[in-house]
């Protein structure tokens, strides 16, 4: 299996510095990062580690769920997955930590009922490699079929 690489170049202090995250393996882009915008409600054109984790988690979950739906005898027509990754203070160790991840999926699926879809979604939440990597963070799931 391949290894994927990203690179960050950072200049300055945490409060006044900024950097650029390069998605090196895919070469799809370089994105601005800064701590003040990371900690703000409005991202202002920059990304953050939390947004990148959300992208990784939503895409990993969607892939895992599509495989599990097929294994259960269904056909995933479309899956819409959102991952909301929250950052907050770490009162136990100081600094910050991920305080939760909320996965939301809405699926158009043939061949599975709501209970079958829910089971596949729960299994995908537990089995996708990004979920496994993030076991120290509470992950919630809201899964529903749409017609």
Image (cartoon, helix red, strand yellow):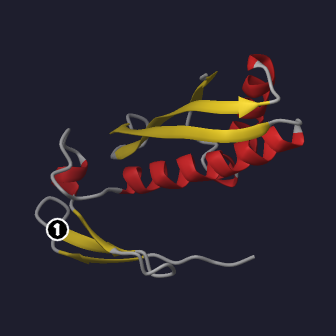
Closer to the camera, 88 or 124?
124
Q: Residue at x 38, y 56 (%)?
A: 49
In terms of secondary structure, where does tag 1 sit?
Answer: loop
Looking at the image, residue 143 sits to the left or right of residue 68; the answer is left
Q: Residue at x 57, y 52 (%)?
A: 59
Residue named by callout 1: 13
Where residue 22 appears, as percent x and y from the top left, is 37, 77
Where's residue 90, x and y in %? 39, 38
Residue 121 position (above or below residue 25)? above
Whether residue 89 is visible to the viewer of this picture, yes or no, is no
Residue nearer the viewer, 110 or 133: 110
Left/right placement of residue 75 relative to residue 140 reads right
- Furthest toward the left, the residue is 16
**Percent coordinates x, y for residue 97 in the rendering:** 41, 44
* Quadrant into which the C terminus falls: top right
Tell me the residue at 47%/53% (across/down).
Answer: 55
């Amino acid at each position: 299996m391949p290894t994927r690489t990203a690179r960050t170049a950072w200049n300055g202090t945490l409060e006044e510095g900024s950097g650029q995250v390069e998605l090196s393996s895919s070469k799809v882009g370089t994105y601005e990062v800064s701590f003040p915008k990371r900690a703000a409600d409005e991202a202002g054109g920059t990304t953050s580690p939390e947004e990148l984790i959300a992208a990784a988690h939503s895409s990993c979950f969607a892939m895992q769920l599509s495989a599990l739906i097929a294994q259960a005898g269904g056909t995933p027509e479309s899956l819409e997955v959102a991952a909301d990754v929250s950052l907050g203070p770490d009162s136990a160790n100081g600094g910050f930590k991920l305080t939760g991840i909320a996965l939301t999926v809405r699926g158009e699926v043939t061949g599975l009922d709501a209970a079958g879809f829910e089971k596949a979604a729960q299994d995908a939440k537990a089995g996708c490699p990004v979920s496994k990597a993030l076991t120290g963070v509470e992950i919630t799931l809201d899964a529903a079929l749409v017609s």
